[in-house]
Image: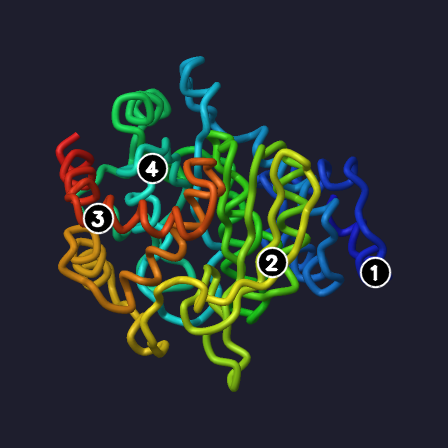
């Protein structure tokens, strides 16, 4: 089935929504050859995925996800996710996971979607597990955790069973050195359907298209960010950066996507360099997160978390500005709320 789309992709013609639905049917079909799936994904990537294609893939795959039975009160309120696409090659610690815990401690309901490491040494699932937080929650357990603790981790393999038939093709593409549309889709497939999202991407030119996709999928508020890491090496972070300028695309109630640059100097950021923001394996990163949440880490790693938490708190409509968000995140840590939230989750 997928082979028929390859001439169209080679001609750089976009797929229609109906064709995307057909393609997804074939990608999750275990009888479709892995090489055919990989060839399709490779040619789609080389053509360049359109906003409409990304949105159509996301909608089709979200429909196949296992939906958690959220109660009406939880569903009616704001639900936040903070997630990067990965692939920035910068080697930072698990910033978005730490930010998600800070936001939950600040009173925001957080549905964290993630997986084990794919493009890094430690994925969100790895570091949460090392912190003692249960990651393999059933849909019912995840819904209860959101209601009772204001935080739940949605482990991608548990909620996207069809992905096991796509994984071998993604692996083959990776062996060929070829990224695929699935490098972009992860943050868009949260089965809890967050109303507010902060997404990090590894290239500035992805900010506006990803924000347009997120808006089209029905999020009430969204921000997509890419931060400068090393201008000489054209290296970026898939999150807001304290190392240099940031490209930010966002939308709110007006539904219009706006794009701007954000300089970290507008906040009390300490001078730093990339080496000071790097992490390591799951145990190393878990220790970094513990130190930040407990208030022991007061240096550049904390600043990176405060900046991204500030943005996430704005997106979740908890504060009205980045400055307010920075101050709330700092208080949440300094008053012991972040450490207490981690202890609460680890004991749940």
The residue closer to the viewer here, 340 or 334, is 334
Q: Residue at x 85, y 55 (%)?
A: 13
Q: Quadrant of residue 255?
A: top right
The residue closer to the viewer here, 104 or 146, is 104
- Asked which secondary structure carries label 2, the reply is loop
Please report whichever mark, 4 or 1, sits nearer to the chain's N-terminal start. Answer: 1
The residue closer to the viewer here, 135 or 26, is 135
Q: Residue reaching furthest bottom?
A: 232
Camera-nearest label, 4 or 3? 3
| Within-10-Å neighbours for mark 4: few <14, some 14–19, many 20+ | many
Q: In which quadrant of the rendered image does the N terminus lie?
A: top right
Which residue has dot 3 on it? Answer: 333
Q: CB of mark 4 within 8 Å of CB of mark 3?
A: no
Please report whichever mark, 4 or 2, sits nearer to the chain's N-terminal start. Answer: 4
Which residue has dot 1 on it? Answer: 12
x, y percent for residue 106: 30, 38
- Asked which secondary structure carries label 3, the reply is helix
Which residue has dot 4 on it? Answer: 153
Please report whichever mark, 2 or 3, sits nearer to the chain's N-terminal start. Answer: 2
Please report whichever mark, 2 or 1, sits nearer to the chain's N-terminal start. Answer: 1
Camera-nearest label, 1 or 3? 3
């Amino acid at each position: 089935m997928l082979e028929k789309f390859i001439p169209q992709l080679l001609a750089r013609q976009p797929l229609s929504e109906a064709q995307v639905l057909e393609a997804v049917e074939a990608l999750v079909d275990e009888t479709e050859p892995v090489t055919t799936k990989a060839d399709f994904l490779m040619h789609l990537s080389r053509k360049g995925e359109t906003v409409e294609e990304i949105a159509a893939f996301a909608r089709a795959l979200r429909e196949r996800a296992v939906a958690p039975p959220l109660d009406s009160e939880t569903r009616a309120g704001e639900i936040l996710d903070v997630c990067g696409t990965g692939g920035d090659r910068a080697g930072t610690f698990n910033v978005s996971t730490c930010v998600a815990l800070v936001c939950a401690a600040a009173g925001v309901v957080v549905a964290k979607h993630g997986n084990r490491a794919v493009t890094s040494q430690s994925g969100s699932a790895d570091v949460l597990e090392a912190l003692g937080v249960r990651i393999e929650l059933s849909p019912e357990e995840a819904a209860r955790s959101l209601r009772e603790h204001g935080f739940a981790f949605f482990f991608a393999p548990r909620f996207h069973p069809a992905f096991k038939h796509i994984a071998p093709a993604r692996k083959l593409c990776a062996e060929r050195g070829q990224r695929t549309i699935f490098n972009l889709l992860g943050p868009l497939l949260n089965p809890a359907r967050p109303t507010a999202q902060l997404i990090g991407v590894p290239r500035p030119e992805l900010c506006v298209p990803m924000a347009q996709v997120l808006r089209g999928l029905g999020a009430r508020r969204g921000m997509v960010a890419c931060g400068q890491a090393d201008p000489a090496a054209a290296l970026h972070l898939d999150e807001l950066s304290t190392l240099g300028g940031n490209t930010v695309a966002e939308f709110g109630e007006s539904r219009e996507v706006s794009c701007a640059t954000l300089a970290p100097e507008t906040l009390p950021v300490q001078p730093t360099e990339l080496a000071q923001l790097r992490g390591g394996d799951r145990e190393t990163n878990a220790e970094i997160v513990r130190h930040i949440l407990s208030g022991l880490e007061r240096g550049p790693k904390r600043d990176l978390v405060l900046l991204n938490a500030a943005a996430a708190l704005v997106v979740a409509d908890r504060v009205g500005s980045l400055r307010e968000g920075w101050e709330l995140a700092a208080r949440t840590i300094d008053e012991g709320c972040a450490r207490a939230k981690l202890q609460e989750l680890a004991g749940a």
